[in-house]
Amino acid sequence: MLTEKQCASLHQVIVSLILQFEEVVAKAQERAMEPVQDGNWSPNDQATVLSERACASEELARMSERLRALCARKEAIERGKFDGLCEECGDPIGFRRLTANPTACCCASCAQEREIRARMVAGGMAPSY
């Protein structure tokens, strides 16, 4: 369980990250709206531009999702609804882990287990429970 001081500190970290993400997302949205220069583009140049825009669009979606998660965590802290406990095992997530990853929903042990299971599934191995 997080102390009041830790919650306040985590809140400050999140507010700072939200401001940074909002700025980056706004700039990325502006770049995505920039018109492609007209001209005699080769098919390779056109493919490059389309590929870069697709990558930028995916990155923008990831950043937007991260921003939403940060805002949700900020609101949970403000409402006193975030206790800092792991969603899987109920143990404390750990203040240093939360400072490094404010949207973490599970402790390091459970996160590691999740990652191992995901790798096993991706590799075609069925995890045994």
Image (spheres, rainbow, N blue to C red):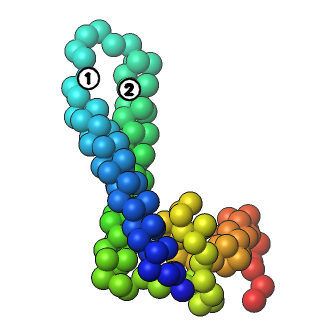
Residue matched to label 1: 36
Q: Is residue 112 found left or right of 105 in the rendered image?
A: right
Pinpoint residue 90: horizontal percent, then vertical percent.
59, 90
What residue sits right under mark 2 in the picture?
49
Q: Is label 1 in contact with label 2 (beta carbons under 8 Å)?
A: yes
Q: Earlier in the sequence, mark 1 or mark 2?
A: 1
At numbered mark 1, what does the secondary structure look like: helix, strand or loop? Answer: loop
- Disc on res. 18: none
Rendered view: 88 above or below 45 = below
Residue 115 rendering spot, x and y as whole percentages: 68, 69
Left or right of 4? Residue 127 is: right
Q: What amino acid type is highlighted by mark number 1?
A: Val
Q: How far is mark 1 from mark 2, CA to CA? A: 8 Å
Instruction: Give the percent coordinates (x, y) of residue 108.
Output: 67, 73
Quadrant of the frame with the N terminus: bottom right
Residue at image point 37% right, 85% down: 81
Which is nearer the eye, 3 or 43? 3
